[in-house]
Amino acid sequence: MEWTDERVELLRKYWSEGLSASRIAAQLGGVSRNAVIGKVHRLKLSSRGRTATVATRQKKVPTVTKTVVKTAAPRTVTTTTTVSIGATALQAQFDVEPVARRHLRPVEDVVVPISRRLSLVQLNERTCKWPNGDPLMDDFNFCGNDVCEGSPYCKYHAKLAFQPASERRRMR
C-alpha cells in the first residue's frame, strides 16, 4: 500500500475528527492500524478532535442524596458532593506495630584456620581444596587442612561453601 496525497488528506481529516487508528484503517482499506499510527507520527499530527466516547470514559463523581423532611411535606433534595478519589488513599493512617528484629547469633565460635598453602600437586583426598588467591598468580595455593567426612573442604570452608537455602535467603 502506498500513501498517496489523497489518502494522506483522508487520514488527516479522519484524525482531526477524532476517529481511532483502527477505524481510520478500516475506512482507508488496505492499511493496518499500526501503519496509520506510524503515518500520524511521521506527519506530526498530535492535536485531535474530541469524540463523544472520550467524555463517557471520565471518572464518575459520586453523588450524595439527602432527604429533608419539613412539616408541610417530605421532599427529596439531591446535592452533588465531590469526593476525592486517588491520592487521598495514600494519606490513610495505618496502625503498624514495630517488627521485632531477630539477631542471629553464631551457633559456635568461628575459627578461621591457618592455611597450609598447598599447591595443586600436593593435594590429596584428605586435604581441603579451597582455593586462595588468583590462579594466574605465582602465590596461588589451596587451604590444605584436614577435610570433613564426605566434603572436599575443611570444616570452616565447608560452612562457607554449603549454606542452607534458608540462610542464603535471610542474608539477602
Image: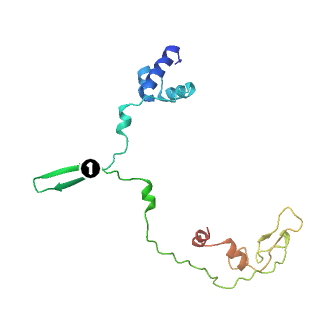
Which one is nearer the viewer's eye here, 56 or 91? Answer: 91
Q: How is the image coloured?
A: rainbow
Which residue is located at x 46 percent, y 18 percent?
Answer: 10
Which one is nearer the viewer's eye here, 144 or 43? Answer: 43
Q: Secondary structure at mark 1?
A: strand
Give the left or right position of residue 72, taking residue 135 as reference.
left
72 lies above or below 112: above
Give the left or right position of residue 3, taking residue 54 as reference.
right
24 lies above or below 121: above
Which residue is located at x 48 percent, y 22 percent?
Answer: 12
Asked if residue 30 shows in the view, the reply is no
Which residue is located at x 41 percent, y 21 percent?
Answer: 27
146 lies above or below 88: below
Give the left or right position of residue 31, taking residue 166 as reference.
left
Where's the C terminus, which quadrant? bottom right
**Mark 1 Cα shell of 10 Å, populated few (<14), some (14-19), many (≥20):** few
Which one is nearer the viewer's eye here, 63 or 30? Answer: 63
Residue reaching furthest to the left = 72
Q: Determine which quarter of the picture holds residue 24.
A: top left
Q: Which residue is mark 1?
A: 79
Could you tell me residue 141's position as x and y percent?
84, 70
Asked if residue 54 shows in the view, the reply is yes
Q: How many marks?
A: 1
Could you tell me residue 119's position as x and y percent?
85, 71
Could you tell me residue 73's position as x and y percent?
10, 52
- The amino acid on which the numbered mark 1 sits, given as a three-letter code, is Thr
Residue reaching furthest to the right = 138
